[in-house]
Amino acid sequence: MTSLVFLITFACIALAYAAASLFCPGRYTPWERVLYAPVYALARVLWRVEIEWRGELGAPTGGFSKDARDRLLGDRMAGGAVLVANHRCSVDPFFVQLVGGRRVHWMVAGEYFKHFLFGPILRSFQAIPTNRGGIDTASTKRAIALAKSGRFVGMFPEGRINRTDSPLLSIRPGAAIVAQRANVPLVPIWIEGAPAGWAVYSALFIPARVRIIVGTPERFEANGQELAAAANTVNEAGELENVSYDRTQSRSDAVAWLSRVMGKSLRMGGHSPDDVGIAGKNWVDN
């Protein structure tokens, strides 16, 4: 009888704790807490993730510290942001999700949405389908609208998983264009020790020790007129509008901005910022 009472009491306490964790106020809705619970469990148990928050505050702080995140990122990300990182494995979005601390919307190649298993998962995470073969105006509009509305958008400027010895593949400036037109900061992130596997799902079974380094969010620097134009290129319907500033010059500025931010990421990872290269010249010229 004593054992039964103990088990019932323990079960009640566990259920109360689970209910409190599920419905207490916070950055996640109850459904999002259920959705992202496996991510946090894998991050802690299988991948042993450590997060370092770097910026003007001095020494980095490790672990899943919400206080450290809020001290470093604080109001800089309160109105939305584009989170950019290097890309070494298929589960890198999970690591960036830990940094955001709330839902991060990802631009994912459209073919994965047709997969019988990955498609429903991607839709539940509210990922944005995109055309891998070139500029996808619809997905770009959607990403701009989300960032402009205060959401987090995650993007890998390399455009694909880096399986080379180079610390960073040549980058495409799409992330900076999204952030510039939504008038939100870019957040540099460097991921080390990610569980690399040739199959998309293999990283889910590979133990690792992952280190995530997060730098200070950086806003686009431009004169007031140009920045105002960039901020108003998306209307309430999420449609790009015609603006009066030089779009080619704006794209060139966006390239320089993203190069600077990814150079910061490389430095955080112990690499030379000179390793940043630009791919997709048509992104700038068109």
Image (cartoon, rainbow, N blue to C red):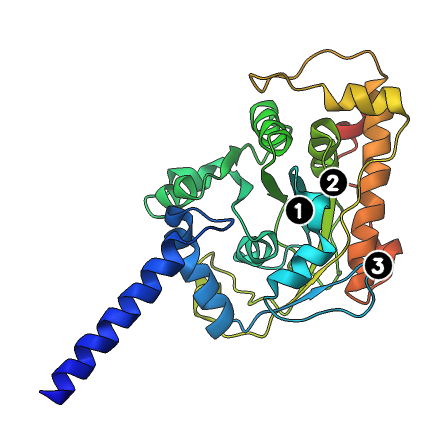
- Marks 2 and 3: which is nearer the front? 3
- In the rendered structure, which amino acid carries the disc numbered 3? Glu
Q: CA distance from mark 1 to mark 3?
A: 19 Å
Identify whether 54 is placed above or below 59. above
Q: Which mark is residue 83?
A: 1
Q: Quadrant of residue 105?
A: top right
- Marks 1 and 3: which is nearer the front? 3
Pointer 2: residues within 10 angstroms few (<14), some, or many (20+)? many
Residue 143 coordinates in the image, percent (x, y): 59, 32
Q: Quadrant of residue 82?
A: top right
Q: Secondary structure at mark 1?
A: strand
User: Which numbered disc flags the more N-terminal residue, 1 or 2?
Assistant: 1
Residue at coordinates 87% horizontally, 61% vertically from top-left?
272
Identify whether 43 is placed above or below 184. below
Asked if one can make out residue 22 in the rendered structure from this viewpoint, the answer is yes
- Front position in the image: 111 or 149: 149
User: Which numbered disc flags the more N-terminal residue, 1 or 3?
Assistant: 3
Q: Which mark is residue 185?
A: 2
- In the rendered structure, which amino acid carries the disc numbered 2? Pro
Asked if one can make out residue 286 in the rendered structure from this viewpoint, the answer is no
User: Which numbered disc flags the more N-terminal residue, 2 or 3?
Assistant: 3
Q: Which residue is mark 3?
A: 56
- In the rendered structure, which amino acid carries the disc numbered 1? Leu
CB of mark 1 within 8 Å of CB of mark 2? no
CB of mark 2 within 8 Å of CB of mark 3? no
Q: Quadrant of residue 96?
A: bottom right
Residue 196 coordinates in the image, percent (x, y): 56, 65
Q: Which mark is residue 255?
A: none
- Front position in the image: 274 or 233: 233
Report the side of 216 relative to 164 (left or right). right
